[in-house]
Image (cartoon, coloured by chain):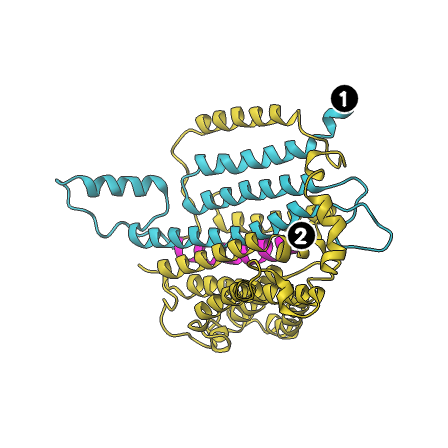
Amino acid sequence: MSNVSDLFNYWVVVFLMMAGFYVVIAQGNLIKKLIGLSLFQASVFIFYISLGFVEGGIAPILEEGVSNYANPLPHVLILTAIVVSVATTAVGLALAVRIHEAYGSIEEDDIQTLDLEADDPDEAPSDKPEDSPR
Amino acid sequence: MRDLFAVAMMFGIYSLLTAALFMDLDAADVAFTEAAVGAGVTTILLLSSLRLTGRWERRPKHSPLLPLLVVGVTGAALVYGTLDMPHLGDPQAPVHQHVAPHYIENAPQEMGIPNIVTAVLASYRGFDTLGETLVIFTAGLSVFLLLGSRAGGRPRPGKTAIGEQPVLRLVVKVLIPFILLFALYVQLHGEYGAGGGFQAGVIFATGMVLYDLVFGEGDARLVVPARWLPRLAAFGILVYGSVGLYALLHGRPFLDYTVLAEDPMVGRHLGILLVELGIGICVFAVVLSIFYALSGRRRQP
C-alpha cells in the first residue's frame, strides 16, 4: 500500500482542519474559537504548500544549473494569505475585546443569557453584568 | 486546557513548527512569513487581548459528543476525498501543469530577478497583491473603528508591563538595531533571496513591538506616534496604486512597469521595488497600529 502512504500529507491537513473545526464549534470562549479558526487556516496553508512541493525540487529562487523548482504559485497565494490572516484575526480579537466590555464576558453562553434577558420586556436589562475575576 | 495563556503559547509553538515544515517543503518565502507573523505577531496580539478579556476559560456546559460526531463525519468524508488526490511531490500533478511552468521558464528573461515568488507576487499577479494589501488596510481600519486609535489615554513612558528586567533590556537593546536592519535587508533584497514587503513590514513592526514591551508602555509611541500610522498605511497603498496609475496615464495597462524607465527590464525592477516598498509600509503601519490599539486599551471594570 505504498500508494496510500503517499497521501499522508492530506490526512495531516484533514486532522488539523478538523481539530480547528472542533474548537470552533465545541468551545464557548470567543478567543478560543478564534484560535481554532487560525488552526483551521493554518491547515489550509499546509495543504497549499504541500501541493506546490515537487520531489527533488528546490525553493523557487533561480540558481545556475537547476531546472526543478517547487511550484511558486501556491507560495505567493499563501504568503499573502498569512499576512491577511493575522489582520483578520486582529479584527476578531478587537471584536472580542469590545464584546467583553459590553457584556463582561466572552463566553458564548453568558452572552446569550444576557441577550435573552435584555429582550425580555418584563425584566430590566442588566447594565452591569457580574465582573469576571481578574 | 482552561488556561488561555497556555493555549496562546502553544499556538505560537505550533506556528513555528509550521514554519519549519514550510521550509522543508521548499517554501522559503512562506516559512519566513509564517515565522514572523504566526510565531511573533499573532502570539503578541492574542496575549494583548487576553489581558483585556481574562486569562481563564470556563468549563463548557455542553456535551462534546455532537460536535465530535460532526467533526468525525466531515473528516471521514474529506479523507475519502483525498484518495483520488495526486501524491505528495509528484511532478505530474495537475497543479504543476498549467501556469506555474510559464512563470518558472519565463520569469528569468521577462523579469531578470532570481526569486520567482517575488516576480509572481509583485508583477505577474500585481492585481491580486494590491487587493490583498487593501484587505490588510481595511482590517487595520476596522480595528481602529472598534478600539479607537488612541484609546487608553496618554502614553506612560518608562512603565513596563513586565517590570524592571535589566538582562532583558540589555539583550533587547543590542538586538533591536539588528532586527530593524534585517527588516530593511529583507525589504530590499526580496528580488534576489527569500523576503519582500510583507515579511519586512512584519519584522519591522516586531522590532517596534519588542521595544514597546521591554522599554515601557508608550515608549515606542514616542518613536512612531500612533497618529502617524493610519496615514502611513494609506501612504503605502498610495505608493502601490500610483505606480499602477502612472502606467495608465502613459497609455499602458494598469501596473505595467515598463513605463517607469527606458529599458523595460529596469522599469520592471523599479516597479517591483516600489510596489514592495508600498506593501512594506502598509503592513508595518497596520500591524503596529493593531498592536497599539490592543495594548493601549485599559481593562474596563
Alpha carbon separation for disc pair 1 and 2? 32 Å
Quarter holding the C terminus of chain B is bottom left
Q: Residue furthest right?
A: A65
Of residues B287 and B124, which is closer to you in this image?
B124
Q: Amino acid at mark 1?
A: Met
Q: Residue furthest front?
A: B251
The chain whose colour is yellow is B
Give above or below for A88 relative to B97.
below
Q: Residue at x 45, y 66 (%)?
A: B292
Q: Which residues are magenta?
A: B31-53
Q: Residue furthest left?
A: A122
Q: Which residue is mark 1?
A: A1
Residue B242 placement (x, y as % from top left): 52, 66
Kindly tell me whether residue B238 is visible in this rendering: yes
Main SS class of the magenta portion in the image: helix
Of residues A44 and B179, which is closer to you in this image?
A44
Q: Which residue is mark 2?
A: B31
Membership of B47 in magenta stretch: yes
Question: Would residue B236 appear left or right of B19 to someone viewing this image?
Answer: left
Tell me, what hue is chain A?
cyan
Question: Would residue B108 appear left or right of B288 to someone viewing this image?
Answer: right
Residue B65 placement (x, y as % from top left): 46, 26
Secondary element under disc 2, as helix, strand or loop, is helix
For disc 1, the neighbor class at 10 Å (few under 14, some 14 to 19, many from 20) is: few
